[in-house]
Image (spheres, rainbow, N blue to C red):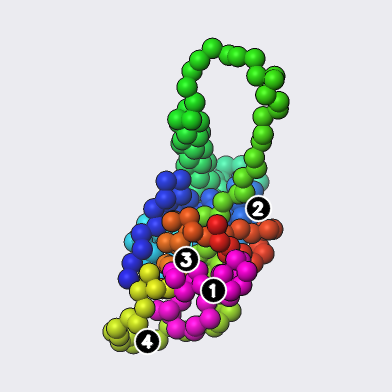
């Protein structure tokens, strides 16, 4: 069972890194490498359990984070301290920050072009008219959409909560449920709960295959716009609701 994580605006290891920096409210010019590396590796663990996408590129960046972290933990002798004091020694994070800043610049440019294209798709050019007789235009507010890595983070916390341990050996067994069956089960549960429930309430089982099946079914329901995920405040429990 595999599921490729590739969204229009969110994909790849640098996107995951930027996501963590934003969620942890980290200054991109002064990255706490220990905390960021730990959060990144925890996300990789959840992705490995879910078998989401190929992890090779993510592992390369994980090795880079560990390398930078190790350089910052090395003891500084007097000569190195003198060099650092007068600004001749480069910060080990400098190259990583440069990559992130460059990536963020192109990501924001791509988002801006995408928004402009979406805006133009809904409009056509014509001469302006006086619309005062029709009253003020209505303005609708849209909720901030959570991305797939928010869900992976919640999945990782749920795994830790259940204290799951992967077996050293694996056996191949026939799956009793399909993604379609689990999607129907999730929809039924949401209806019984009044149309909304906590993220972890959907994961009642303790077996890894069942947890993965539930997570993939939830992603499919989001893709079909049958359910939506929201979070009232940062670090709070995710809420799943019917649309």
Q: Nearer the viewer, residue 221 or 69?
A: 221
Q: Position of residue 205 (x, y in %)?
A: 49, 83
Secondary structure under tag 3 reads helix
Residue 230: % across, % down: 61, 58
Determine the CA span between mark 2 and mark 4.
Answer: 37 Å
- Sequence-first disc among 1 and 3: 1
Q: Position of residue 142 (x, y in %)?
A: 62, 45
Tell me if residue 201 is in the magenta stretch. Answer: yes
Numbered disc in front, either 2 or 1: 1
Mark 2 falls on what kind of element? Answer: loop
Distance from Cα at disc 1 to Cα at disc 3:
12 Å
Residue found at x 56% / y 70%:
190
Residue at the disc numbered 3: 218
Residues under numbered marks 1 and 3 in contact, where contact means CB atoms less than 8 Å apart: no
Callout 4 environment at 10 Å: few (<14), some (14 to 19), or many (20+)?
few
Q: What residue is at 55 percent from the left and 57 percent from the top?
A: 243
The residue tagged with tag 1: helix, strand or loop?
helix
Residue assigned mark 2: 25
Which badge, 2 or 4, is on the more N-terminal residue?
A: 2
In terms of sequence position, does the residue under pointer 4 or pointer 3 come before the other? 4
User: Depth check: 102 or 129 in front?
Assistant: 129
Circle 4 residue:
168
On residue 189, the disc is 1
Specify whether residue 243 is in view: yes
Q: Nearer the viewer, mark 4 or mark 3?
A: 3
Magenta span contains residue 72: no
Tell me the CA gap for discs 4 and 3: 28 Å
Residue 53, position as x, y percentages in the image: 36, 61
């Amino acid at each position: 069972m595999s599921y490729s994580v590739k969204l229009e605006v969110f994909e790849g290891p640098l996107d995951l890194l930027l996501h963590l920096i934003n969620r942890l409210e980290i200054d991109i010019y002064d990255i706490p490498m220990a905390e960021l590396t730990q959060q990144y590796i925890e996300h990789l663990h959840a992705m490995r359990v879910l078998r989401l996408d190929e992890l090779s590129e993510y592992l390369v960046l994980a090795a880079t984070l560990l390398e930078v972290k190790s350089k910052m933990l090395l003891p500084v002798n007097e000569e190195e301290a003198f060099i650092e004091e007068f600004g001749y020694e480069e910060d080990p994070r400098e190259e990583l920050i440069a990559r992130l800043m460059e990536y963020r610049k192109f990501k924001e440019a791509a988002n801006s072009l995408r928004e402009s294209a979406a805006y133009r798709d809904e409009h056509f050019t014509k001469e302006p008219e006086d619309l005062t007789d029709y009253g003020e235009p209505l303005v609708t507010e849209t909720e901030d959409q959570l991305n797939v890595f928010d869900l992976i983070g919640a999945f990782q916390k749920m795994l830790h909560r259940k204290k799951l341990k992967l077996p050293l050996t694996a056996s191949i067994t026939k799956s009793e449920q399909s993604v379609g069956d689990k999607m129907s089960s999730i929809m039924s549960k949401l209806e019984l709960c009044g149309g909304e429930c906590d993220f972890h309430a959907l994961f009642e089982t303790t077996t890894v295959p069942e947890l993965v099946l539930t997570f993939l079914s939830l992603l499919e329901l989001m893709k079909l716009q049958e359910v939506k995920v929201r979070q009232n405040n940062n670090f709070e429990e995710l809420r799943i609701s019917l649309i």
